[in-house]
C-alpha cells in the first residue's frame, strides 16, 4: 500500500511539473482537476499528499530549479579576478531569473515564507561563496555576509523589476542595465579590486 501511495505521489509531482513547464510557470492556467486528470488520480489524493495546490506547486518548482542548479557549472575564464568571476556568475543567475520569471518568483517567495538550509536561496548563496573563496580555500566572514547581501539584493531587484528604474536608476528588465546594476553591487559589496589573495 505504501508503494502504491508513493507511486501516486510521484505521478502527481510529475504531472504538475509537466503542466508548470507547459504553462511557462503561469499557475493561473493550472487547476487541481487538471493535475488530477493528468496524474490519473482523484483530487482527494492530491489534497491528502500536499494539502493545497500551492504546497504541491512549491514542491515541483523546487524540483525544477534543483534540476537546473544541480547542472549549473559555469565555465569561467581563469584569467579573471575573483570579482569579475563573481560578476559573471551573478549575471548568469539574473539571466536565469529573467528567463524563468514565474518559476523564480514562486521559488523566491516560498524561500522567504519558509526558509530552509537547503532552499534555493541558500544554494545561491553557497554557489556565490564558492566563487569567492580565496586561493587558500578560506572564506572570510565578511565575504559570507556580502554573498548573503548580494543574493538578497538580487532577489529584491528581481521581484521589483518593474520599479527598479525609480528605485535605483537601473531597469532590471534590460540586460545591459541589469548587468551594470550587478557590476555596481559586486563592487560595492566586495570592493572593486582583485580579491584573489
Image (tube, rainbow, N blue to C red):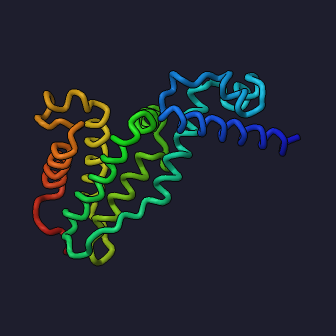
Closer to the camera in the image, 108 or 146: 108
* Residue 185 coordinates in the image, percent (x, y): 17, 48
Query: Which quarter of the rendered picture does the N terminus lie within?
Result: top right
Q: Residue at x 31, y 53 (%)?
A: 92
Q: Please say if 179 is above or below 26.
A: below
- Furthest toward the front, the residue is 22
Query: Which quarter of the rendered picture does the C terminus lie within?
Result: bottom left
Q: Please say if 52 is above or below 39.
A: above
* Residue 93 coordinates in the image, percent (x, y): 33, 50
Q: Residue at x 48, y 28 (%)?
A: 26
* Residue 59 coordinates in the image, percent (x, y): 58, 38
| Left or right: residue 101 compared with residue 181 | right
* Residue 168 coordinates in the image, percent (x, y): 13, 34
| Left or right: residue 127 compared with residue 65 | left
Place residue 72 in its image quadrant: bottom left
Closer to the camera in the image, 18 or 115: 18
| Left or right: residue 177 compared with residue 23 | left
Place residue 5 in its image quadrant: top right
- Furthest toward the bottom, the residue is 136
Q: How many labels sit on residues?
A: 0
Closer to the camera in the image, 133 or 39: 39
Amino acid at each position: 500500500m505504501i508503494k502504491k501511495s508513493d507511486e501516486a505521489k510521484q505521478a502527481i509531482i510529475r504531472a504538475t511539473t509537466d503542466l508548470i513547464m507547459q504553462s511557462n510557470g503561469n499557475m493561473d492556467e493550472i487547476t487541481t482537476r487538471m493535475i488530477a486528470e493528468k496524474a490519473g488520480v482523484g483530487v482527494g489524493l492530491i489534497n491528502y499528499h500536499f494539502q493545497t495546490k500551492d504546497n504541491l506547486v512549491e514542491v515541483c518548482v523546487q524540483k525544477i530549479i534543483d534540476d537546473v542548479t544541480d547542472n549549473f557549472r559555469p565555465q569561467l575564464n581563469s584569467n579573471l579576478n575573483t570579482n569579475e568571476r563573481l560578476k559573471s556568475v551573478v549575471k548568469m543567475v539574473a539571466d536565469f531569473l529573467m528567463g524563468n520569471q514565474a518559476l523564480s518568483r514562486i521559488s523566491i517567495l516560498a524561500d522567504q515564507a519558509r526558509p530552509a538550509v537547503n532552499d534555493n536561496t541558500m544554494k545561491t548563496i553557497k554557489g556565490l561563496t564558492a566563487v569567492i573563496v580565496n586561493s587558500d580555500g578560506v572564506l572570510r566572514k565578511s565575504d559570507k555576509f556580502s554573498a548573503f547581501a548580494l543574493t538578497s539584493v538580487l532577489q529584491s531587484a528581481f521581484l521589483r523589476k518593474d520599479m527598479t528604474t525609480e528605485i535605483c536608476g537601473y531597469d532590471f528588465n534590460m540586460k545591459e542595465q541589469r548587468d551594470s546594476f550587478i557590476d555596481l553591487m559586486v563592487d560595492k559589496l566586495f570592493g572593486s579590486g582583485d580579491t584573489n589573495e
